[in-house]
Amino acid sequence: MKTEIIISGFGGQGVLSMGKILAYAGLLQGKEVTWMPTYGPEQRGGTANVTVILSDDRISSPILQQFDIAIVLNQPSMDKFEPRVKPGGVLIYDPNGMTREPARKDITIYKVTATETAIAMNAQKTFNMIILGGLLKIAPVVKIEHVMQGLKNSLPERHHHLLDANKIAMEQGAKIIEKII
């Protein structure tokens, strides 16, 4: 099985980190993985995205035109990537700052109020883990224990005290993701 994912939003939202953790978890599960970040020179505040492919078989190319799953965290990302979700695919979005709802009828759309939830939890830095928890609830492409191991391996040791907060954030994301009809 192969899953092609794009995660896109503003720099500083943890987009690249979320992709890296997802890719790391895939490696820990013995999957073939690509992780391809894209960002402009402005980084924080500019648009950033990352393509992650997780596959049981060899991956021929990391370059994609369409995606099985798109996670969009700002309006420019919605405008750019909603049309590029494969028919029958999945779009996940946080409504904060969006000026319009997704319009496609041939894909499954999910909303995760991650910004609002992170603020309520007083844990804004776990925003991306809330989103990741929502993704893994509806598309369990990797196991949570591998995500946690990947997070531990990629975080500097001085931040390991944040592991529990990140796990709680993922659990919260799994609870709040809702399908849009």
Image: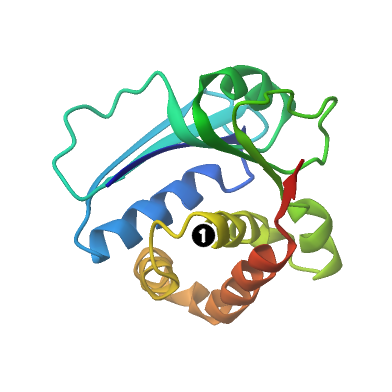
Residue of label 1:
136
Quarter of image, res 133: bottom right
x and y, in percent, of residue 51 in the image? 40, 35
* In the image, residue 103 above or below residue 10: above
How many numbered marks does the figure carry? 1
Residue at 16% in and 29% down? 60
Which amino acid type is marked by label 1? Answer: Leu
Q: Nearer the viewer, residue 159 or 23?
A: 23
Q: Nearer the viewer, residue 177 or 12?
A: 177
x and y, in percent, of residue 11 in the image? 61, 36
Give the position of the C terminus as an image quadrant: top right
Residue at 25% in and 65% down? 29
In this view of the protein, can residue 10 be seen by the observer? Answer: no
70 to the left or right of 50: right
Residue at 57% in and 48% down? 14
Question: Under tag 1, what secondary structure?
Answer: helix
Callout 1 environment at 10 Å: few (<14), some (14 to 19), or many (20+)?
A: some
Residue at 22% in and 55% down? 31
x and y, in percent, of residue 158 in the image? 48, 75
In this view of the protein, can residue 111 be seen by the observer? Answer: yes
x and y, in percent, of residue 171 in the image? 63, 72
126 to the left or right of 148: right
Q: How is the image coloured?
A: rainbow
